[in-house]
Amino acid sequence: MSKKTVKTAMDLKNLKAGGFIKERGKDLFTVRLRVPGGRLPIARLKKIAEVAERYGGDFVHLSVRQSIELIHVNFKDFDAVVAALGEAEQQVASCGARMRVPTACGGCEYNPHGLVDTQASALEVDRELFGSETGHHKFKVGFAGCPFDCPKSAINDVGFQGAIWPRLRQDLCIHCGLCVKSCTEKAIEKNPDDTLSFISERCTYCGDCVKVCPSEAWQVEKKGYTVRVGGKWGRKPLVGTLFAVFLPEEQVVGFIAAVLDWYREQAQGMGRIRIGDVIHRVGADSLLAHLRKDFPESVVESTIPPQVIDTQIGKQ
Protein backbone atom coordinates (compact mmCIF):
# COMPACT_ATOMS: atom_id res chain seq x y z
CA MET A 1 0.00 0.00 0.00
CA SER A 2 1.59 3.24 -1.09
CA LYS A 3 1.81 6.15 1.26
CA LYS A 4 -0.20 9.16 0.27
CA THR A 5 1.56 12.51 0.47
CA VAL A 6 -0.40 15.01 2.50
CA LYS A 7 0.15 18.70 1.80
CA THR A 8 -0.63 21.10 4.57
CA ALA A 9 -1.76 24.58 3.59
CA MET A 10 -0.37 27.55 5.50
CA ASP A 11 -3.12 29.45 7.28
CA LEU A 12 -2.20 33.01 6.31
CA LYS A 13 -5.18 34.47 8.18
CA ASN A 14 -4.06 33.00 11.50
CA LEU A 15 -0.47 33.99 10.83
CA LYS A 16 -1.49 37.59 10.19
CA ALA A 17 -3.57 37.63 13.37
CA GLY A 18 -0.40 36.61 15.17
CA GLY A 19 1.69 39.40 13.66
CA PHE A 20 3.21 37.50 10.70
CA ILE A 21 2.14 39.24 7.49
CA LYS A 22 2.64 37.64 4.08
CA GLU A 23 4.81 39.60 1.67
CA ARG A 24 4.96 39.49 -2.13
CA GLY A 25 8.07 37.34 -2.15
CA LYS A 26 7.74 33.54 -1.93
CA ASP A 27 7.85 32.24 1.65
CA LEU A 28 8.65 35.72 2.98
CA PHE A 29 6.83 37.55 5.76
CA THR A 30 6.89 40.83 7.64
CA VAL A 31 7.03 40.29 11.40
CA ARG A 32 5.35 43.10 13.33
CA LEU A 33 6.71 43.71 16.83
CA ARG A 34 4.82 44.79 19.93
CA VAL A 35 5.98 48.25 21.05
CA PRO A 36 3.23 49.80 23.23
CA GLY A 37 3.39 53.56 23.38
CA GLY A 38 6.40 53.56 21.07
CA ARG A 39 8.72 53.05 24.05
CA LEU A 40 11.62 50.70 23.39
CA PRO A 41 14.44 50.01 25.87
CA ILE A 42 17.91 50.26 24.35
CA ALA A 43 18.82 46.65 25.21
CA ARG A 44 15.70 45.42 23.42
CA LEU A 45 16.43 47.62 20.42
CA LYS A 46 19.89 46.07 20.14
CA LYS A 47 18.42 42.58 20.18
CA ILE A 48 15.89 43.53 17.49
CA ALA A 49 18.72 44.82 15.30
CA GLU A 50 20.62 41.60 15.85
CA VAL A 51 17.62 39.44 14.92
CA ALA A 52 16.80 41.61 11.90
CA GLU A 53 20.35 41.35 10.62
CA ARG A 54 20.37 37.57 11.01
CA TYR A 55 16.89 36.65 9.76
CA GLY A 56 15.58 39.70 7.86
CA GLY A 57 16.52 41.98 5.02
CA ASP A 58 18.74 45.03 4.83
CA PHE A 59 16.34 47.27 6.76
CA VAL A 60 13.47 47.34 9.22
CA HIS A 61 10.29 49.37 8.86
CA LEU A 62 8.96 51.81 11.44
CA SER A 63 5.19 51.61 11.12
CA VAL A 64 2.89 54.60 11.54
CA ARG A 65 1.65 53.04 14.80
CA GLN A 66 5.04 53.02 16.50
CA SER A 67 5.86 49.38 15.79
CA ILE A 68 9.06 47.97 14.33
CA GLU A 69 8.57 45.50 11.50
CA LEU A 70 11.16 42.94 10.45
CA ILE A 71 11.13 42.61 6.67
CA HIS A 72 11.77 39.58 4.44
CA VAL A 73 11.67 36.91 7.16
CA ASN A 74 11.39 33.34 5.83
CA PHE A 75 8.53 31.39 7.44
CA LYS A 76 10.98 28.57 8.28
CA ASP A 77 12.70 30.96 10.70
CA PHE A 78 9.59 31.94 12.67
CA ASP A 79 10.41 29.84 15.73
CA ALA A 80 14.02 30.99 15.79
CA VAL A 81 12.99 34.66 15.44
CA VAL A 82 10.43 34.45 18.25
CA ALA A 83 12.90 32.63 20.51
CA ALA A 84 15.69 35.15 19.87
CA LEU A 85 13.40 38.12 20.47
CA GLY A 86 12.17 36.45 23.64
CA GLU A 87 15.67 36.67 25.08
CA ALA A 88 15.07 40.42 25.35
CA GLU A 89 11.38 40.00 26.31
CA GLN A 90 10.33 41.36 22.94
CA GLN A 91 7.01 40.02 21.68
CA VAL A 92 5.33 39.89 18.29
CA ALA A 93 2.26 42.11 17.80
CA SER A 94 -1.14 41.17 16.37
CA CYS A 95 -3.34 41.98 13.41
CA GLY A 96 -6.86 41.06 12.42
CA ALA A 97 -10.13 41.60 14.30
CA ARG A 98 -8.63 42.25 17.66
CA MET A 99 -7.30 44.94 19.97
CA ARG A 100 -4.06 46.33 18.55
CA VAL A 101 -1.01 47.68 20.37
CA PRO A 102 -1.87 51.13 21.80
CA THR A 103 0.06 54.17 20.61
CA ALA A 104 1.03 57.13 22.79
CA CYS A 105 3.10 60.28 22.97
CA GLY A 106 5.62 60.87 25.76
CA GLY A 107 2.93 62.27 28.05
CA CYS A 108 3.87 64.28 31.11
CA GLU A 109 7.03 62.36 31.94
CA TYR A 110 9.37 64.65 29.99
CA ASN A 111 7.20 66.60 27.53
CA PRO A 112 6.46 70.11 28.87
CA HIS A 113 3.00 70.09 27.25
CA GLY A 114 1.97 66.73 28.70
CA LEU A 115 -0.88 66.75 31.23
CA VAL A 116 -1.26 63.03 31.96
CA ASP A 117 0.96 59.93 31.98
CA THR A 118 0.09 58.52 28.57
CA GLN A 119 2.93 56.00 28.69
CA ALA A 120 1.60 54.42 31.88
CA SER A 121 -1.88 54.28 30.33
CA ALA A 122 -0.62 52.68 27.11
CA LEU A 123 1.38 50.05 28.98
CA GLU A 124 -1.58 49.20 31.23
CA VAL A 125 -3.96 48.89 28.29
CA ASP A 126 -1.45 46.75 26.40
CA ARG A 127 -1.01 44.49 29.44
CA GLU A 128 -4.72 44.08 30.14
CA LEU A 129 -6.41 44.21 26.72
CA PHE A 130 -3.89 43.57 23.94
CA GLY A 131 -5.12 40.92 21.52
CA SER A 132 -8.74 40.96 22.76
CA GLU A 133 -10.94 39.68 19.95
CA THR A 134 -13.67 41.96 18.67
CA GLY A 135 -15.39 39.51 16.36
CA HIS A 136 -15.85 42.24 13.74
CA HIS A 137 -12.78 44.27 12.82
CA LYS A 138 -9.56 45.81 14.11
CA PHE A 139 -9.70 48.01 17.20
CA LYS A 140 -7.13 50.76 17.75
CA VAL A 141 -6.46 52.91 20.79
CA GLY A 142 -4.26 56.01 21.00
CA PHE A 143 -3.17 58.37 23.78
CA ALA A 144 -2.27 62.05 23.50
CA GLY A 145 -0.94 63.90 26.52
CA CYS A 146 -2.56 67.23 25.68
CA PRO A 147 -4.93 68.90 23.16
CA PHE A 148 -2.12 69.27 20.62
CA ASP A 149 -2.92 65.60 19.92
CA CYS A 150 0.35 64.73 18.19
CA PRO A 151 -0.55 60.98 18.03
CA LYS A 152 -3.85 61.91 16.28
CA SER A 153 -5.92 60.13 18.91
CA ALA A 154 -9.20 61.24 17.31
CA ILE A 155 -8.71 58.86 14.35
CA ASN A 156 -8.52 55.83 16.63
CA ASP A 157 -11.48 53.64 17.53
CA VAL A 158 -11.03 55.05 21.03
CA GLY A 159 -8.79 58.09 21.43
CA PHE A 160 -7.66 59.63 24.71
CA GLN A 161 -6.45 63.20 25.10
CA GLY A 162 -5.00 64.68 28.30
CA ALA A 163 -7.19 67.41 29.78
CA ILE A 164 -7.24 69.89 32.68
CA TRP A 165 -10.19 71.91 33.94
CA PRO A 166 -8.80 75.06 35.62
CA ARG A 167 -10.15 76.93 38.62
CA LEU A 168 -9.37 80.58 39.34
CA ARG A 169 -8.55 81.93 42.80
CA GLN A 170 -9.08 85.68 42.33
CA ASP A 171 -7.60 86.36 45.78
CA LEU A 172 -4.24 84.92 44.66
CA CYS A 173 -4.10 86.74 41.32
CA ILE A 174 -1.32 89.33 40.97
CA HIS A 175 -2.76 90.72 37.69
CA CYS A 176 0.33 89.91 35.63
CA GLY A 177 -1.70 89.03 32.54
CA LEU A 178 0.39 85.98 31.59
CA CYS A 179 -2.64 83.70 31.51
CA VAL A 180 -4.48 86.08 29.17
CA LYS A 181 -1.53 86.13 26.78
CA SER A 182 -1.04 82.35 26.90
CA CYS A 183 -4.67 81.43 26.25
CA THR A 184 -4.87 81.05 22.47
CA GLU A 185 -8.59 80.29 22.67
CA LYS A 186 -9.36 83.66 24.35
CA ALA A 187 -11.05 81.85 27.23
CA ILE A 188 -9.55 84.32 29.73
CA GLU A 189 -10.26 88.03 29.59
CA LYS A 190 -9.04 90.88 31.77
CA ASN A 191 -11.75 93.15 33.17
CA PRO A 192 -11.44 96.96 33.62
CA ASP A 193 -10.87 96.46 37.37
CA ASP A 194 -7.98 94.04 36.67
CA THR A 195 -9.97 90.97 37.71
CA LEU A 196 -10.21 88.03 35.31
CA SER A 197 -13.16 86.43 33.58
CA PHE A 198 -13.10 82.79 32.53
CA ILE A 199 -15.24 82.05 29.46
CA SER A 200 -15.56 78.33 30.09
CA GLU A 201 -17.22 77.39 26.79
CA ARG A 202 -14.07 78.45 24.92
CA CYS A 203 -11.72 76.32 27.03
CA THR A 204 -10.04 73.38 25.29
CA TYR A 205 -8.61 71.93 28.54
CA CYS A 206 -4.97 72.64 27.66
CA GLY A 207 -3.98 73.83 31.14
CA ASP A 208 -1.67 76.55 29.84
CA CYS A 209 -3.11 79.04 32.33
CA VAL A 210 -2.11 76.75 35.21
CA LYS A 211 1.39 76.30 33.81
CA VAL A 212 2.20 79.99 33.37
CA CYS A 213 0.60 81.37 36.54
CA PRO A 214 3.36 82.53 38.93
CA SER A 215 1.07 82.88 41.95
CA GLU A 216 -0.92 79.65 41.63
CA ALA A 217 -4.12 81.63 41.18
CA TRP A 218 -4.99 79.18 38.41
CA GLN A 219 -5.29 75.69 39.86
CA VAL A 220 -6.30 72.25 38.63
CA GLU A 221 -9.88 71.45 39.53
CA LYS A 222 -10.19 68.30 37.40
CA LYS A 223 -7.68 66.28 35.39
CA GLY A 224 -8.04 63.22 33.21
CA TYR A 225 -8.76 62.24 29.64
CA THR A 226 -11.06 63.65 27.02
CA VAL A 227 -12.29 60.55 25.17
CA ARG A 228 -13.41 60.33 21.55
CA VAL A 229 -14.86 57.20 19.98
CA GLY A 230 -15.36 56.05 16.40
CA GLY A 231 -12.33 57.35 14.55
CA LYS A 232 -10.56 55.51 11.76
CA TRP A 233 -8.47 56.18 8.68
CA GLY A 234 -8.41 54.39 5.35
CA ARG A 235 -10.65 54.69 2.31
CA LYS A 236 -13.53 56.26 4.21
CA PRO A 237 -12.04 58.13 7.18
CA LEU A 238 -13.93 59.17 10.30
CA VAL A 239 -12.97 61.52 13.11
CA GLY A 240 -14.04 60.25 16.50
CA THR A 241 -16.40 62.41 18.55
CA LEU A 242 -16.66 63.30 22.22
CA PHE A 243 -18.05 60.65 24.58
CA ALA A 244 -16.36 61.48 27.90
CA VAL A 245 -14.47 64.28 29.61
CA PHE A 246 -12.00 64.20 32.51
CA LEU A 247 -12.08 60.42 32.67
CA PRO A 248 -9.69 59.46 35.51
CA GLU A 249 -6.53 57.73 34.35
CA GLU A 250 -7.27 54.69 36.50
CA GLN A 251 -10.56 54.11 34.63
CA VAL A 252 -9.06 53.86 31.15
CA VAL A 253 -8.96 50.06 30.93
CA GLY A 254 -12.53 49.71 32.20
CA PHE A 255 -13.76 52.32 29.75
CA ILE A 256 -12.19 50.59 26.76
CA ALA A 257 -13.54 47.23 27.93
CA ALA A 258 -17.05 48.74 28.13
CA VAL A 259 -16.75 50.17 24.60
CA LEU A 260 -15.58 46.77 23.34
CA ASP A 261 -18.54 45.02 24.97
CA TRP A 262 -20.96 47.42 23.26
CA TYR A 263 -19.17 47.03 19.93
CA ARG A 264 -19.24 43.22 20.03
CA GLU A 265 -22.96 43.17 20.77
CA GLN A 266 -24.19 45.94 18.49
CA ALA A 267 -22.18 44.87 15.45
CA GLN A 268 -23.57 41.36 15.34
CA GLY A 269 -24.81 40.55 11.86
CA MET A 270 -23.14 43.61 10.32
CA GLY A 271 -20.09 41.76 9.00
CA ARG A 272 -16.62 43.28 8.96
CA ILE A 273 -17.31 46.73 10.36
CA ARG A 274 -15.48 49.32 12.48
CA ILE A 275 -17.09 50.79 15.58
CA GLY A 276 -17.45 54.26 14.02
CA ASP A 277 -19.66 52.84 11.30
CA VAL A 278 -21.67 50.92 13.90
CA ILE A 279 -22.33 54.19 15.74
CA HIS A 280 -23.59 55.70 12.49
CA ARG A 281 -26.06 52.84 12.08
CA VAL A 282 -27.19 52.40 15.69
CA GLY A 283 -26.82 55.97 16.95
CA ALA A 284 -24.52 57.56 19.51
CA ASP A 285 -27.17 57.56 22.26
CA SER A 286 -26.97 53.79 22.56
CA LEU A 287 -23.25 53.86 23.34
CA LEU A 288 -23.66 56.85 25.67
CA ALA A 289 -26.32 55.02 27.67
CA HIS A 290 -24.13 51.92 27.89
CA LEU A 291 -21.11 53.89 29.12
CA ARG A 292 -23.09 56.06 31.50
CA LYS A 293 -23.92 53.03 33.67
CA ASP A 294 -20.30 52.67 34.80
CA PHE A 295 -18.89 56.15 34.14
CA PRO A 296 -21.70 58.60 35.01
CA GLU A 297 -19.39 61.41 36.12
CA SER A 298 -17.38 61.45 32.90
CA VAL A 299 -19.75 60.55 30.06
CA VAL A 300 -21.18 63.58 28.26
CA GLU A 301 -24.92 64.23 28.06
CA SER A 302 -25.02 64.14 24.28
CA THR A 303 -22.71 63.93 21.31
CA ILE A 304 -22.68 63.70 17.52
CA PRO A 305 -21.76 60.67 15.38
CA PRO A 306 -18.15 60.30 14.18
CA GLN A 307 -17.55 62.87 11.50
CA VAL A 308 -17.06 61.83 7.89
CA ILE A 309 -14.05 63.24 6.07
CA ASP A 310 -14.95 63.86 2.45
CA THR A 311 -11.95 62.64 0.47
CA GLN A 312 -13.61 63.84 -2.77
CA ILE A 313 -13.02 60.38 -4.26
CA GLY A 314 -15.81 57.85 -4.57
CA LYS A 315 -19.39 58.12 -3.39
CA GLN A 316 -19.68 58.86 0.34
Image: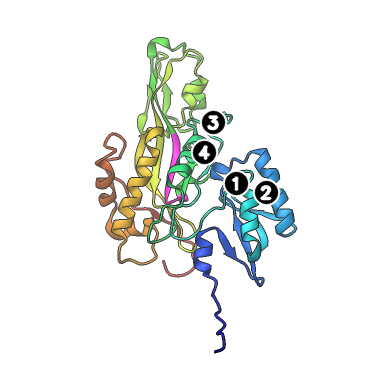
Classify 10 Å Cα crowding around label 3: few (below 14), some (14-19), many (20 and above). Answer: some
**Is the residue under label 2 in contact with that under label 1 (CB below 8 Å)?**
yes
Magenta range: 155-162
| Pointer 2 or 4: first along the chain | 2
Q: Residue at the location (63% across, 43% down)?
A: 88
Find disc 1 in the rendering and name its residue: 90
Classify 10 Å Cα crowding around label 2: few (below 14), some (14-19), many (20 and above). Answer: many
On the image, the x and y values in percent for residue 266 come to 29, 58
Kindly state the secondary structure of the residue where label 3 is placed.
loop
Q: Quadrant of residue 98?
A: bottom left
Find disc 3 in the rendering and name its residue: 113
Kindly state the secondary structure of the residue where label 1 is placed.
loop
| Pointer 3 or 4: first along the chain | 3
Residue 172 lies, with reference to residue 203, above or below; the image says above
Find disc 4 in the rendering and name its residue: 148
Quarter occupied by the N terminus: bottom right
Classify 10 Å Cα crowding around label 4: few (below 14), some (14-19), many (20 and above). Answer: few
Query: Distance of mark 3 from mark 1, alpha carbons?
Result: 30 Å
